[in-house]
Every structure is written in C-alpha cells, then in structure tokens.
Image (cartoon, coloured by chain):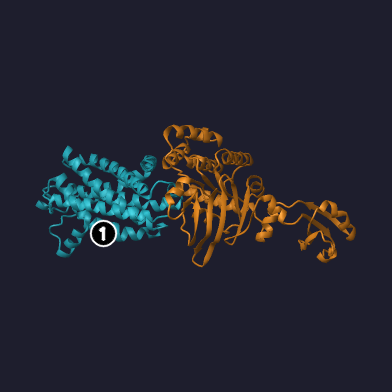
Chain colours: A cyan, B orange
C-alpha cells in the first residue's frame, strides 16, 4: 500500500515536471516534424518507392517511422534523465524513503510512458493531415507506442542507474540510440536491403515496431507476421523492465 | 533502549578511510551531536546510517533494524535533512511536502493537517504554492526541515540543519527539534558548525576527527575534562616556565604571543598568579566553551564560514541545475 502511494507520488511528480517544462516538450516535437517536413519533403521529391511504399508518397511512408523515432528517443532520454535527477540530488529524497526500489522504478516508467504517449497523440493528430487515420489505427499505434515506450524508458533508466555523470551521454547516443533508430527501417523499406543489413535490422527490436506501425497506419503488408511483431515488442519491454528492476535494486 | 548502535562501522573510499571503526550507542529520545572538522566523516557516517552508503565493514542498527539486511525498515524509521539541498525545484513547496508524505505513506487527513502545521511553523504558508525555484536559500532550508519532520520519524538525522538560516529561524528550529524529541521521543542525530547551538541543544556530543570518534560525552563533562578555566595573559616575555610549581595550573603554553593557561578555579588563584609575574598588560579569564574542547581534540578551530561557503555553493549548484 505504502509502495503504491509512493509510486503514485513519483508518477505525479514526473507529470508535473512534464507540464511545467513546456520547452522540453516543444523541442522534442520539433525534431520529428523536421524529419517529416524537411527530410520527407526533400527526399520525397526524388525518391519513389513504388509498390514498396504501398502507393504512398515518401513523406507519408516515413510517418510510422517518425512516430517510432519520437517514441524511442523521448523514452530513452526520459530514462537517462535520471542521471541529472541524481546530480542535483532530487533523487536522494526518493532513494532514502521507504518506497521500494521496484516501486520507484515503476513510478518512473509510468511517468515516462505518460509523457511520451501524450507527445505521440500530438503527432498522431498532426498525421491526420496526410496519413489515413481511423480509430483502429490510432488505437493500434498507441499500443505499439506504449510497448516501445515501456521498453525504452526502462532501458534508459537501467543505463542511467549505472552512471553518476552525463559524460557517457554522447557515447550512448552514438552507439545505441542512432543504430537502433536507423536499423529499424524507420526511413526505408526493409525488403530490398542487402543481406547483412537485413540481418542487423532483424536484431533490432524496434524493427518489429516499425513493421507493425506501417501495417496498422498505412495498410502495407507486414514483412513479419503481426503476431511476431507484438510478441517481440512485448518480450523486449518485459526484458528491459526486468533489467531495470535489477539495476534499481542495486542502486544506492 | 538504544536507538542507534554501531559496531566497528567503517567506510573506505580507495585509500582514504572516511569512517574508521566507529562504535556509537545513541539512546532513544536523545539529541546527539556529531561534531568534527570538514571531511572528518560526519556526513559519511550519516549516509551509512540512512542506507545511502554501504559500509566497507562493521555493522549498525537503527531503530533496531540492521542497516544492510533491513534497509527498507531503516528507511521507514528515519527522517533526513541533507547538507546539500534535495528539494525538487520544479515543484511548489506544498507539492514537495505532498510528495514526501506519499513516499512515507502518510494518510490524506494527517497529510493536509500536518503539512499546513509545518509550513506555518517554518513561516512558509504565504509562499507554499510558489515553485521552489523562486525560493531564497533560507526558505529552501526551512522547507527541507519541515519536510524532514513530516512523517514523525523515530530517528531524525539533521546534517547542518541551521546552516544559512537567520538567527530567529535558527532558534525556532532548535526549539521545535527539542519539543519533538521530548514529546514524541524522537531520537535526533545532528551535525552543526555552531558550537554554541550544539552546547545548548545536545544531550551528548561525539567529536569525530579523521574518521575516528575521539571524544564522547555530555557537553558539560567534555568541558569539565579540560580541567579548569582558561586564562590568557599578555606580557612582554611569555614563558610557560614562569609559573611552574603551581599545582592548580593544569596546562601552560604560549599561543599568539600570549601565555595561555588552564587553571582550576581561576577566580580564586588569579591574585597569586599575577603577583608572581611582572608587566602583565592584559588578563582574560573565561570558562571553557565547546570550541575549546573541539580545539583540544582536533587541534583545529571549527570555522563557521567553512560550512557556510560549502552550503551556499551547493545551493547555487542546485539553483543552476533546477533553473
């Protein structure tokens, strides 16, 4: 009971921070919009995916991928932000309380997912302008976004719980965030890829999210059965949550 | 019943031994002062006792719970006011209190009543719904104190609780701390740079230097241990041997060009001493303070500005980080 109340307290804190730090929200929306408008508009004028793109223009084709980008980056950075909490000693107050490490972890995960899903909703609204949108596609997209958010927030928190400073931040971005994003096929279809790249892509759990999103939003037949997509995403989320729980337990 | 018991508690950071096999026993309801120069190991000791640091060796029990094996029970029993600010500057004062109440499972009814009560006590009601970012250093400190008292902890750890506070608030704070320790049998463990406050508030005092507890007693007995009053004589040729042979002189040395003596019952013996010396230009007699005790055991004077600077720096960092 005490843990549930504590978990709620932590979630509420995260939500209030999100509400008050508007600039953070706005800047996190700017990058995906630039990708859609500038990259989508620029490349879209020369690239024609033909049937691989399900008949859609490039701009519309990458929308599911950009939605994934917003979800994954927002989530992992939210998780990594715990290093900063720790640096300015905000976390100490929580760590010294009787709330279990597991409850703190879940409070943070829920907080991160809330932030990210609100941003995803904003992007989905913008998408109405050029992506076929139905209640079913919105619901499906949110489920995918939630699974990715759980996994990536938990991953960010796990990494964040190991570090005491933000020095390793750039390394994480270069060697983890970018590869995960580019390999997911967010910006291109997977089918024509050379074998080595394809293999690498299949090792990236986010590939399955992009595959599912494309099928849900654009009706492009999935390269992998949808069931497998969801299974992989759920397994990834569960694995990361387990990792994070263990990471938080040894945190002092 | 003892509230805190440590045995051989040790913390090493690489080659540095921050706390060196500390054995402490602190009674329930006691106000215990931990004094020492900066870097002596006070904060490290507290961090181990509140389970934020793992000891290298040794054990400790807080409120009957082992700090390693029953960490969550320990955390439920203690309240902490840290030396470095740990407020959430994005939240308001009241929200910081509410978060704390939720973390400690304080029920809604008690929560509202007690938060209002404590905010009033620390004179923060008027600004309770402002974001902490806009608070002054003193206000932040008061809010942290209010927060530490919120859940009626069995043991309250206060690391430099009055640093950066104005004299009135400081006095009020100590009064409140004394009241809760008497009425609710709360054990209080505190560190402070203000010797006079430690003297007035603490039932017992432990002096810690280089990680070791070098003295532990009531303030009165610690002062008594110095063996008498302090007499300072200014004369042209200060020489400790001038007064040799007087049995009531416990210690004689030259400090700052003056003859510094520790004398039993100085008032009665001063005339005789003065008659033996020529050309004394000034005499100072005083009863020893805790500062003298501190000097004797650590060889250093405690300086208030040391702590002050550290705290301000921390507050600055915090403000920059939060804002």
Is B244 placed left or right of B55 in the picture?
Answer: right
Q: Is residue A67 visible?
A: yes
- At x 77%, y 51%, the residue is B286
Q: Position of residue B99 (x, y in %)?
A: 43, 40
What kind of element bears circle 1? helix
Say whether residue B103 is left or right of residue B42: left
Subunit under mark 1:
A
Quarter of image, res B100: top left
How would you rate the neighbour count of disc 1 (Cα within 10 Å): few for under 14, some for 14-19, many for 20 or more? some
How many marks the image carries: the answer is 1
- Give the residue drawn at x 67%, y 50%: B219
Residue A132: image location, x then y, percent = 15, 41
- Residue in the picture at 42% in, 57% down: A164
Q: Which percent across, then down, holds residue A39?
A: 23, 51
Q: Is residue A236 above or below residue B240?
A: above
B61 or A68, which lies in front? B61
Q: Which residue is mark 1?
A: A179
Q: In the current view of this chain or complex, which residue is farthest to the left?
A: A51
Looking at the image, the residue that sits furthest to the bottom is B15
> Is B291 on the left-hand or right-hand side of A20?
right
| A252 and B65: which is toward the camera | B65
Tell me: B222 left or right of B6. Answer: right
Residue B48 image point, x, y percent: 49, 55
């Amino acid at each position: 009971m005490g843990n549930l109340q504590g978990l709620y307290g932590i979630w509420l804190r995260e939500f209030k921070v999100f509400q008050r730090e508007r600039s953070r929200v706005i800047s996190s929306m700017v990058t995906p919009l630039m990708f859609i408008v500038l990259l989508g508009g620029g490349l879209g004028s020369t690239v024609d995916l033909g049937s691989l793109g399900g008949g859609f223009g490039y701009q519309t084709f990458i929308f599911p991928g950009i939605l994934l980008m917003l979800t994954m980056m927002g989530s992992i950075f939210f998780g990594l932000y715990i290093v900063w909490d720790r640096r300015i000693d905000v976390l100490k107050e929580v760590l010294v309380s009787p709330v279990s490490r597991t409850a703190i972890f879940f409070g943070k995960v829920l907080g991160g997912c809330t932030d990210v899903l609100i941003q995803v909703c904003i992007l989905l609204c913008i998408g109405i302008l050029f992506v076929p949108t139905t209640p079913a596609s919105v619901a499906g997209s949110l489920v995918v976004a939630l699974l990715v958010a759980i996994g990536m927030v938990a991953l960010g928190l796990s990494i964040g719980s190991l570090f005491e400073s933000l020095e390793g931040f750039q390394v994480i971005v270069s060697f983890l965030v970018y590869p995960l994003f580019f390999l997911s096929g967010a910006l291109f279809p997977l089918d024509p890829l050379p074998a080595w790249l394809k293999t690498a892509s299949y090792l990236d759990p986010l590939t399955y999210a992009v595959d599912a999103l494309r099928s849900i939003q654009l009706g492009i037949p999935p390269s992998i059965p949808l069931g497998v997509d969801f299974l992989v995403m759920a397994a990834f989320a569960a694995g990361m949550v387990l990792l994070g729980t263990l990471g938080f337990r040894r945190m002092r | 019943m003892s509230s805190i018991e440590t045995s051989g508690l040790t913390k090493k950071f690489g080659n540095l031994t921050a706390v060196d096999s500390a054995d402490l026993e602190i009674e329930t309801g006691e106000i215990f002062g931990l004094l020492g120069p900066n870097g002596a190991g006070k904060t490290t000791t507290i961090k181990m006792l509140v389970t934020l640091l793992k000891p290298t060796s040794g054990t400790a029990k807080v409120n009957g719970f082992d700090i390693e094996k029953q960490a969550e029970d320990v955390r439920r029993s203690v309240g902490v006011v840290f030396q470095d600010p740990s407020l959430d500057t994005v939240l308001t004062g009241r929200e910081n209190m509410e978060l704390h109440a939720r973390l400690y499972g304080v029920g809604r009814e008690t929560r509202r009543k007690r938060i209002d009560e404590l905010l009033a006590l620390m004179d923060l009601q008027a600004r309770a719904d402002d974001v902490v970012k806009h608070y002054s250093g003193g206000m932040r400190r008061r809010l942290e104190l209010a927060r530490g008292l919120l859940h009626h902890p069995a043991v309250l750890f206060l690391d430099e609780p009055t640093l950066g506070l104005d004299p009135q608030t400081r006095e009020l704070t100590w009064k409140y701390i004394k009241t809760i320790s008497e009425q609710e049998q709360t054990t209080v463990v505190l560190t402070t740079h203000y010797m006079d406050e430690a003297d007035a508030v603490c039932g017992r005092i432990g002096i810690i230097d280089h990680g070791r507890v070098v003295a532990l007693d009531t303030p009165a007995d610690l002062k008594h241990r110095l063996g008498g009053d302090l007499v300072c004589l200014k004369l042209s040729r200060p020489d400790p041997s001038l007064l040799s042979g007087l049995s009531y002189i416990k210690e004689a040395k030259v400090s700052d060009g003056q003859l510094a003596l520790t004398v039993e019952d100085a008032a009665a013996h001063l005339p005789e001493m003065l008659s033996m010396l020529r050309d004394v230009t000034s005499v100072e007699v005083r009863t020893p303070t805790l500062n003298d005790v501190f000097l004797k055991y650590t060889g250093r004077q405690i300086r208030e500005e040391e702590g002050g600077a550290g705290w301000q720096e921390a507050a600055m960092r915090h403000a920059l980080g939060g804002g």
